[in-house]
Each structure stands twice: as C-alpha cells, then as structure tokens.
Image: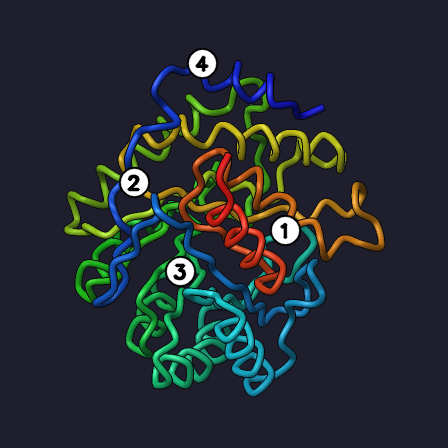
Amino acid sequence: MITLAGLADLAQEFGDGPRDPVGPLLIGGQAFDVDASPVVMGTVNLSRDSTYRESIATSTSSAIRKARIQSAQGAHLVDIGAESSTARAARVGAEEQARAMVPVIEALASEGILVSAETYLPQVARACLQAGALVLNLTGVEYQRECFDLAAQFGATVIVCYVGGANVREVTQVRTEDPIPVLAEHLQARVELARSHGVQRLVIDPGLGFYYANLTDPMTRVRHQAKVLLQTFRLRALGLPVCHALPHAFDLFEDQFRQAEGYFAVLAALGGTSVMRTHEVASVVPVLRAMSDLDT
C-alpha cells in the first residue's frame, strides 16, 4: 500500500532529490516552468493497432478533431504518432508514417497548437519538423545522430526516451529492482550526445509506456510503473524535465480504466514529473489543478 509514511521514507532515503530544480521546458517561443506546474501532453494515435482504443484517429480529420479537443481540454501540446509501440502491432514504413502525420501536423500548427511527433526514423522526423512539429519524441537510438542533427537544424525540442534496443519496436527487458540508476546512465549518455550535435532543448523519458518482455504480467508492469513514477525525483539530478506516459492499468481499474491516468497523475506529480503524456486530458488536467491549488 502507498502510505504517507512510505513516501516520507522514500524522500528521506534519497536526500535532497525531491527538491532538485530542473530547467524550464522550452518549445518554440514558449517557456514552461514545469517546477511550478507540470505540462500536459495529449495523445493522438494514427495506428489502429494502438492498445488505447479511445485515442485512435481513423482519418486525418478525426486526428485533427481529437487534437483540437485535447487542446481545448487543457493539453499544452499534443503528441502525434503513426506506429504503435506494442509488440504485435504492424510495422509502418517511413513514407506511410509521414503521409499520415504531415497533414495533421500542418493543420494543428497553423492553428497554434504545439505538436510533438513520435518516431525513430529520420525521414519521418524531417517531414514532421518541416510540417511544423516543434517537438521530436525520439523512440529509438539507431538513427539518433541523424535525428539530433535534424532537431538542431529546426531548433526543435527532443524527448529522449529510454530504449533498450535499436528502437522501441525491438522487445527488450527492463531492470525492475531499483531501475533508476540504469535509466539515469542511459539517458545521461544520450543527452550528452544530443548536446554534442547542437540540441539544447531536451526532455528525458524513462519509457514507462513501452512493451517489455519481463513486464507482460499486468500487475508486475503496473507496480514497476508506480515505483518509477514515485521515484522520478531521482532523475531530476540530470537537470532536465522528466516526461512520463501515464499508465492506464486495466487490471486494476477494469471498466473504470479511463479514470486510471488521473490517479497515476497524482503519483507522477508527487514524484516530480515535469511532463505527463496522457490519453485522458480531461481527467488529468483538473487533478493537477487540484494538487496545485490545495495546500498541505
């Protein structure tokens, strides 16, 4: 059980970690003070293989409509992707991904909605950045140098995700017993590489939303996710905003699963998360507002 005493012990064990400041999140001409209030990232999936069915857009107009709604509900930016990261999802080629994503990004960018493009392919990254995406949600390492060069060229913000293989579609395992040191080492090395390629606007993502071979049991997976959410402050020593995909934990919430991300937003906020990637913007935004407005 998560208890106040347990949270106090966690904070005491790791010293000043909960108070480590991180720099602002810079996107385009905007600066977000994520220590004052977390940024909410909405999600629109253009792949029919995505496990969160409510986030799937079946057409360009559907994707634009969903993103507009999420923006109106309080999302600061919207993440667009065209290939699911689940193990059984079909592979989607670079041309097909770009063809699906570009018209959506162009429409949203023209309306002033901040857009993040999720990909691990430089061809897709280039097309999306040219279309107006200001954030590159980088889910691979194989072509990261090319992607970093593109981000530097366009002045884009890069979310560096923890990826065990060449890209997120390669199924790997993740450390479950105190995963934070491994995550920190991996992310720090890639942040340094990104900076060497001229990327200055960076966010780190521990990869909680991805598929892992040793987390196929739903309860094992969600316990790992909760542990990392609550210990996010240990990654703040890197000095960068930390992004998390909020779990939806169907086995815990069953027919109320759409409420799950609001619950996990509480754990994420307590842990010091800077950016919350969610399918349920309407649930997460008021939860974060309440945590900000209420005093202990």
Residue 233 at what x, y percent from top left? 41, 30
Horizontally, residue 143 falls left or right of residue 223, namely: left
Q: Earlier in the sequence, mark 2 or mark 4?
A: 4
The residue labelled by disc 2 is 240
Q: Which residue is mark 4?
A: 12
Circle number at residue 152: none
Q: Amino acid at mark 2?
A: Leu
> Which residue is disc 3 drawn over?
121
**x 41%, y 85%: residue:** 107
Q: How busy is the neighbourhood of tag 1: few (under 14 within 10 Å), some, or many (20 plus)?
A: many
Tell me which numbered mark, 4 or 3, is placed earlier along the sequence. 4
Measure the C-alpha gap from mark 4 to mark 3.
42 Å
Q: From this view, report whether residue 269 is shown above or below residue 28.
A: above
**Is disc 1 in contact with disc 4, using a CB cutoff of under 8 Å?**
no
The disc at residue 262 is 1
Q: Nearer the viewer, mark 1 or mark 3?
A: 1
Q: Mark 3 or mark 2, which has the lower sequence index?
A: 3
Q: Amino acid at mark 3?
A: Leu
**Category of crowding for the residue at label 3, using alpha-carbon neighbours closer than 10 angstroms: few (below 14), some (14–19), many (at least 20):** many
Question: Would you place residue 21 above or below residue 263 in this image?
Answer: above
Relative image position of residue 164 (x, y in whole percent):
48, 36
Which is nearer the eye, 136 or 244? Answer: 244
The type of residue carrying mark 4 is Gln
Q: Could you tell me how far apart the alpha carbons at marks 1 and 2 are, in whole angstroms?
A: 24 Å
Q: What element does badge 4 sit on?
A: helix
Q: CA distance from mark 1 to mark 3?
A: 31 Å
Sequence-wise first label, 1 or 3: 3
Front label number (4 vs 3): 4
Nearer to us: label 1 or label 2: 1
Q: In whole angstroms, how far apart are the C-alphas of marks 1 and 4?
A: 26 Å
